[in-house]
Amino acid sequence: MTKKKNYLTCDGNQAAAHIAYMFSEVAAIYPITPSSTMAEYVDEWAAAGRKNIFGQPVFVQEMQSEAGAAGAMHGSLQAGALTSTFTASQGLLLMLPNMYKMAGELLPGVFHVSARALASHALSIFGDQQDVMAARPTGFALFATGSVQEVMDLAAVAHLAAIESRVPFLHFFDGFRTSHEIQKIEALSNDDLAPLINQEALKAFRDRALSPDAPVTRGTAQNDDIYFQAREASNPFYDAVPDIVEKYLQKLAIVTGRKYGLFDYYGDPEAERVIIAMGSVTETIREVVDHLTAQGEKVGVIAVHLYRPFKASAFLSAMPATAKRIAVLDRTKEPGATGQPLYLDVKDCFYGKEGAPEIVGGIYGLSSKD
């Protein structure tokens, strides 16, 4: 598909806000570094009357805290309005209770998170992925991007996949390193993305909206006779997410010419040593791979995009069969764990497989220590 390209010089936060504005009818916001400018852009555009993909300005409401923003988002989604928010670090932690509710009720909201360190022995405003990893059990799909162009492209996939799958998405990128990095990128427009929306799924979402004209009971208290079964009933929705994301990645490639996968491999097709990571570091590793392959070394890198749900078969397909040694880089720290989250997921993929490669894990870049 040939179209005139529209270029934009912007940072990661503006790219995420640009896409979020298109797909949102409501934005429930509260500022926190380094995510604040995403909400500021959306608020500014709404005040100027900019139209979203549905031909309306976004309704923006700043709450009293991130907990309030998450609660407002939950209620807005239950009322049938596509809703987004923007946060990081301690702000994301305040949203966790409502994230469990949104995921449990299969509400297709999207969080855009400029991933940031958490306050432990000390507070830090700088980037890592500790906050995102704290959200792993909530039931949100976790979707990683590593450059400003990836933010523009894959934020759209997060919104499109959430609408179709009914699973809420947390789209994240590294605080400051990507959120504030300025690049010249191709900007996507309403006209580019509107045809990709699953209108049937969108109508079904709106039809499920709470209404006094058709009252239903939701959010009940359940006892041991039914809670377990009801909790397991969402499994098919999560099983479908990777294929839905892959479908939209393929549709996006037709629009933009840029191809992405759930896991993107870069390097020698017969690599013996492979690094696995998420986020902005993958851009740096690609430079290293280019340097080493030019010297004849067989190396490569896998950039993880869809981290949750983790599709093991897609990961193994991306991994060269020749790999003998794998290094997994986690930008988080879970004290007392036998390993960090991504490392344990990778090890699990190879568990019990004959001739499995040697796998080591490492922590890097806490509080933007690059």
Image: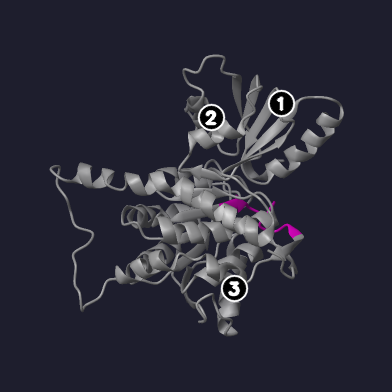
Q: Residues within 10 Å of mark 1 (few under 14, many from 20)?
A: many
Kindly indicate the quadrant of the structure image that contains residue 108.
Answer: bottom left
Magenta span dominant secondary structure: loop
- Alpha carbon separation for disc pair 3 and 1: 40 Å
Mark 2 and mark 3 lie on one chain; the one further toward the N terminus is: 3
Kindly indicate the quadrant of the structure image that contains residue 254.
Answer: bottom right
Question: Which amino acid, mark 3?
Answer: Asn
- Alpha carbon separation for disc pair 2 and 3: 37 Å
Kindly identify which numbered label has been placed on residue 190: 3
Q: Residues within 10 Å of mark 3 (few under 14, many from 20)?
A: some
Colour approach in the figure: one colour
State yes or no: discs 2 and 3 in contact (Cβ < 8 Å): no
Provide the residue span drawn in magenta: 172-182
Residue at mark 1: 271
Residue at mark 2: 346
Mark 3 and mark 1 lie on one chain; the one further toward the N terminus is: 3
Q: Is residue 104 left or right of residue 171?
A: left
